[in-house]
Amino acid sequence: MATEENLRWATRDLSEFFGAYAGGNPIELRDALLEFYPDFVRVYGEQGAELAAEFYDEARSSARVSGTYRASLAAPIPDAQAVGSAKWAIGPAFEENWDTALSQLVGASTRLIQQQGRDTTLWNTDRDPRAVGWRRETRSESCWFCRMLAGRGGVYTRETVFFAAHDNCRCVTAPAWDQDAKRVPVKVYELSKNTARMNPKQLETHRERVREYLAANAADLT
């Protein structure tokens, strides 16, 4: 799939960049990365957005949707968001844990690069007069929560919530035009948001809330 190929090239380039500094002075890595990273995310993010727009137009044509509509690209993510993620990701390098730093950096990059492509689908389903929303589609390695969100078969819209993604998430968005499709309620998606700044104790409490909600509403989530 073209999206996966885009991510593979991005990971290769990022790993090569990181490798030039690994084992050295982490301050030099940080300074070089903060100059390199926003452009890196923007370039690969725009490629992902272009692929998403092409997919949108092809899917619309294949579904024989009436009317004329041409997908456009969503805005790139802000540089400040990329910088903040990079600073967090390489934290372990300052404790000489270079492997963890690279793993976190690749994971964050996977999320950020895909964001513009996902936003492109959301942007266009919100503006296309024939679209009813978007679906979440997973990959074989997707986590249990992503599979649950996608497996319900429902449609998300701007009136529900944005697409929530974790690091290394491979889920993608796909437009939907079925007027009879089930709409997903806000509550379950709200439970997946705002975890990035949680400490380990808060994160575990949050996950327990999610598990309790899923157990109590299992019949409605399948």
Image: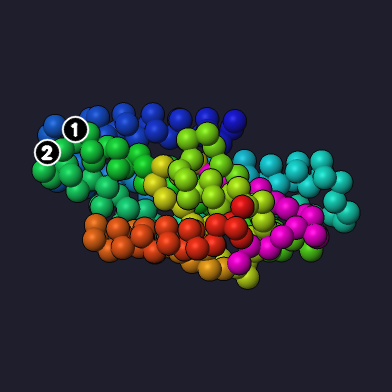
How many numbered discs sit on the rendered protein?
A: 2
Residue lying at 44% horizontally and 47% vertically, measured from the top left? 111
The residue tagged 2 is 96
Q: Secondary structure at mark 2?
A: loop
- Specify the segment rendered in magenta: 171-185
Answer whether residue 82 is magenta in the image: no
Visible in this render: residue 119? no
Left or right side of 108 for 176:
right
- Which comes before the other along the chain, label 1 or label 2? 1
Q: Between residues 3 and 24, which one lies in front from this camera angle?
A: 3
Q: Between residues 161 and 61, which one lies in front from this camera angle?
A: 161
Visible in this render: residue 65? yes
Amino acid at dot 1: Ala
Residue lying at 39% horizontally and 47% vertically, measured from the top left? 167
Residue lying at 24% horizontally and 61% vertically, measured from the top left? 201
Q: Position of residue 97 (x, y in %)?
A: 15, 38
Amino acid at dot 2: Glu
Left or right side of 212 for 71:
right
The residue tagged 1 is 22
Category of crowding for the residue at label 1, using alpha-carbon neighbours closer than 10 angstroms: few (below 14), some (14–19), many (at least 20):
many
